[in-house]
Amino acid sequence: MGITSRSQSPAVVRVEGGEVQGVVADGVESFKGLPFAVPPVGELRWRPPQPAAAWTGVRQAAEFGADCMQGRFGPPPAPGAPPARMPSEDCLFLNVWRPAGAATSKLPVMMWIYGGGFMGGSGASAFTSGMQFAKQGVVLVSLNYRVGRFGFFAFPALSSERPDEPKSNYAYMDQIAALQWVKRNIAAFGGDPANVTIFGFSAGGVSVHSLVASPMARGLFHKAIAQSGGSRDSVLTARPLRADGVDSNYPVSAETLGTTFARSMGIEGTDGAALARLRALTSEQVLRGAPAPAGTNPPQVETTPILDGKLITETAETAYKARRQPRIPLLLGSNSADTAGNRIRATTKDEFLARFRQWSAQAKAAYDPDGTEDLPAMIARANDDFGQAEPARFAANAFAANGSPVYLYRFSYVQAGMRERLRAGAPHGGEIGYVFGTLSPGPGAALTPEDQALSHMAQSYWVNFAKTGDPNGAGLPVWPRHDPKKDVIFDFRPDGSAGAGPDPRKARLDVTQLATESGKRSDP
């Protein structure tokens, strides 16, 4: 049964597991901590998410569930702050925000996929609250998905166990399970299961590209937004499951990493008994791994998506080049100082230019035309271009080529209170507070009308796109569809205005593309 009253009192909604009751605040109803799968613990560690158990009575949905198992990110809590939720393997929860009393509506649905390098993140962050989206007529869903070794892990005995199941990409399985839950249940909240937009930032943006390219996710969403999500290989894309030495980006296979981890924990062999011992490790042991020997600082083991052959059958770049992606509206872009990662390393300008191979002269003209540019600035810009800006353009071109409506952006605005600290431009993730309407003032500064206007503008574009597949709307600067034949970028500009115009980075992105494609052709 759905909601029978449009009052501002908490409503009771029936989902497949039972009845849930949310809370109402400021015209928005939220339902938090809804389980979309059983806890993936014990024998269910490193298994696809299984259907959530039913409950009796009305489940109160006023509090977020636990975050998935991860290390602590960010500064310690301020004195007097409430204790943080402790991460747990029992973490497969999602949250829903909707306009209060929207039971019989068919509102657009947006599902947010958090970033965090596939090592951390939370669907419960105040920074990505769905309050403001709900006020604009959207049903906003956020979810938790497994990260780190819990989210991406391979081991020979796992590969042979239950061969009918997908393997290794448990983070993506969680995301797909949440989308399946949305398809089955979101109508009870007034959402339209035939109008679902996935969107995410960083690893969440990588997830968007991966879901677009995955045969297992087809039909579960209808539009996509990738915020600083790359799309080229080697940016958190996909590691081979078994074969070592076949991928220049990831020369060590996922099974080799899993076997090495098991040995580090004193577990020999690769059979079912060894897998049972791996599953018997505590959550903290899986998270932290073996203690490092005294006086050493071993590198962190990278956990990335895996080419498992069922869920991830190819990388997004491979799919896009072959035009195998679905024909859906896509909105994507990156920020003006989006320098997450360190793909480009150089101690001299000559070393920097050599990264561009036979196009070093074009690189010099693009990055250091008069020879006076600062090397660290050149490196930061190139990391941005290789990691985010050029891959966004590549994906935009690929989708436009198959007839999809595509809207490409660059976010260059920095709120007034942060400009002294963020002189290079909008950093990785700098657009999120604007998109969600959750901006907080900088130290010792208040939000300005310009800050708030830019936030309203950005969120309006995102909402319009979720509603219709086109971000444009009344009172907004025109955002043209991307045309690969035209050198145009839609920019949220440093002065608070927005609009389309010639891309000042064209020369940089062109030589980045040449170097990227050349590197692939010369790889063994």
Image (cartoon, helix red, strand yellow):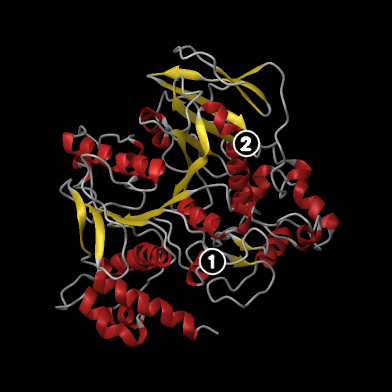
Q: Residue at x 36, y 37 (%)?
A: 436
Number of residues whose C-alpha sits closer than 10 Å to that of mark 1, classed few (under 14), some (14–19) or many (20 or more): some
Residue placed most toward the observer, 429 or 54 = 54
Expressed as whole percent of the image width and height from the top left, the position of residue 105 reads 47, 27
For label 2, the residue is 184
Q: Residue at x 36, y 75 (%)?
A: 513
Expressed as whole percent of the image width and height from the top left, the position of residue 89 reads 65, 40
Q: Residue at x 23, y 48 (%)?
A: 413
Q: Is residue 44 above or below residue 18?
A: below
For label 1, the residue is 324
Quadrant position of residue 184 = top right
Expressed as whole percent of the image width and height from the top left, the position of residue 303 reads 58, 58
Quadrant position of residue 438 = top left
Kind of residue sitting beneath label 1: Arg
Expressed as whole percent of the image width and height from the top left, the position of residue 54 reads 72, 27
Relative side of 81 to 293, left or right:
left
Kind of residue sitting beneath label 2: Arg
Relative side of 119 to 398, left or right:
right
Q: Does the image show residue 324?
A: yes
Residue placed most toward the observer, 484 or 123 = 484
Quadrant showing the N terminus: top right
Number of residues whose C-alpha sits closer than 10 Å to that of mark 2, classed few (under 14), some (14–19) or many (20 or more): few
